[in-house]
Amino acid sequence: MSDFSWATAHSTLEGFGGTPVTLYVPKTGLPFFDALRLYGSIDLYIGLREDVSIDDRGDRWKVSGRCRTGRISGKDERAFQQVWSKKKPEPGPFCRLLRSHLMEGVPLQGEEKWPPAVKGLAGLDAPLQAGIRHTAAASYATLQSGQTSPSTCCVLKIPLSDGILAFAGKKRVEAVGEMTFLPVFEGQIDLSKVVSPLRAWVGVPNVLCSQALVLLALKTSLFVEGYQKRLKGVVFKTDFPGQRSDNYSGLVTIASTAIGRIRSVNFVAHVYRIFRELIAKAWKRQGRSYQTTSRTPDALGMAYWLMQPVGKHLTSMITSQERLRRERVPHIFTSPEYVKEVFGMSYGEWKGDHEAVRKFARAVASGIYHARMDEKKDKSERGKAWYDEVTMLRSASSAKAFVERAMILIEQGHRKHTQVGTTHRNEAYDPQKLLGSMGDDRGNFETFRDLFRMYLVQESTYQAKEEPVEAERPEPEAKDVQNQSEGENE
């Protein structure tokens, strides 16, 4: 018989899995530095475990979890000894004060020290560096911004308590590279899996493109763990050589980006793949520098929309996808569902009819093929002919000019192939719904035109053959339609 007693179960199981711990980590206002301090605090006093919960309270983080005291015993003192070598204060008493400061959420009791941001405290954040110009220029003797002697005034000093926490975080996530990104989460998270630095392995000299690439990579990978909804953003730090103006750090809040609004794992993986291939060809490395290519505007146009999905950025992003379609390069508009998702991110609850616009775009795509592309044998000439017509439609100054140009293409295409714009090819659109979708002012028309352009790219791209709409169609005509569809979508 077992001697287990339910009467003593509470006392027996108390402390199982670790001792409950709550930390209050105040923010300094430097996002990357604060993230290092957050992860350093968790590593020193809780441990990177699967049941850590993070609550962002604006001016501080509240972190809850369970720690096994035997595993973390002495970690804070060892970190202290690597950043402070003087006799006073001693490791034990100072670390006890630091522990109380974090667990009770009160100011640090005792004398704070201000060591220079060099040696073990170097590289914590882009602003925390030696040789800041306005400080160095305070004295003529230290005007050289490259001077790093701790005895001079041009070396920044930071609080010892913050330095210990940031040093612990840096050791946990230390990276080698010119750009380092750290994810910031809120809610319960398994930090043993997701706290690691992210690097843009493809050489990308543009910080905005790197940010978009990293967010896409992170969002794609977090779908595997089920943590995509707990990602709140990323903090980043650059470490480019030389005196470059883009050496800085910051925070990207994912909720404000198109990446944060993507709900489909297939779509985010698709966008990540397309964007990664695009920026790999947007810059060409020459020695230590990079040269732009013809794909650079396309990469920038896509990056601007990914980071801020407003209407004006969507227009530029669509242009980049049109150029990719002209060059027969993969683009993101490969299905109607993707078009709807992209459009909804920029324009929200649109009142028009998606199906009417899609069928109209399909009819125009067929018209462009039969009227402009069918007789051209060279693929590059076909792409140029398609893009020329797209440019004409894109530059239409009014709804009237746009409709006239589109109808000319449909009529000329119908003259070459009698089923263009008909139900036989599922291209019979509803004129009333189409005109209603255009609206009665320029703003509504431009919104409609963006949606039409996306559907035009999607309908001009190779896709699986659809079943005929009318079952009673004669067999020879059905066969002819299939052959023509295959040719149009080459």
Image (spheres, rainbow, N blue to C red):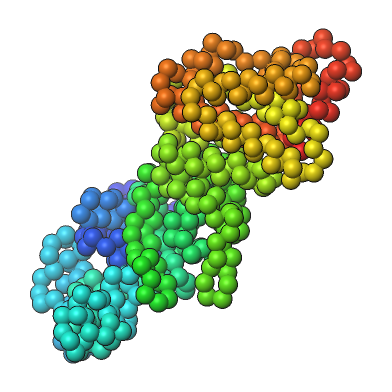
Residue 86 lies, in percent from the top left, at 20, 89
Residue 457, image quadrant: top right
Q: Nearer the viewer, residue 13 or 370?
A: 370
Residue 64 lies, in percent from the top left, at 29, 55
Q: Residue at x 28, y 73 (%)?
A: 128
Q: Indicate whether 19 appears above or below 270.
A: below
Residue 23 lies, in percent from the top left, at 24, 59
Q: Residue at x 88, y 16 (%)?
A: 475
Q: Indicate whether 181 appears above or below 135.
A: above
Q: Indicate whether 440 appears above or below 316.
A: above
Furthest residue toward left: 110
Say whether residue 18 is left or right of residue 26. right
Q: Residue at x 13, y 69 (%)?
A: 108
> Is residue 47 in view?
no
Q: Nearer the viewer, residue 103 or 336?
A: 336
> Is residue 379 in view?
yes
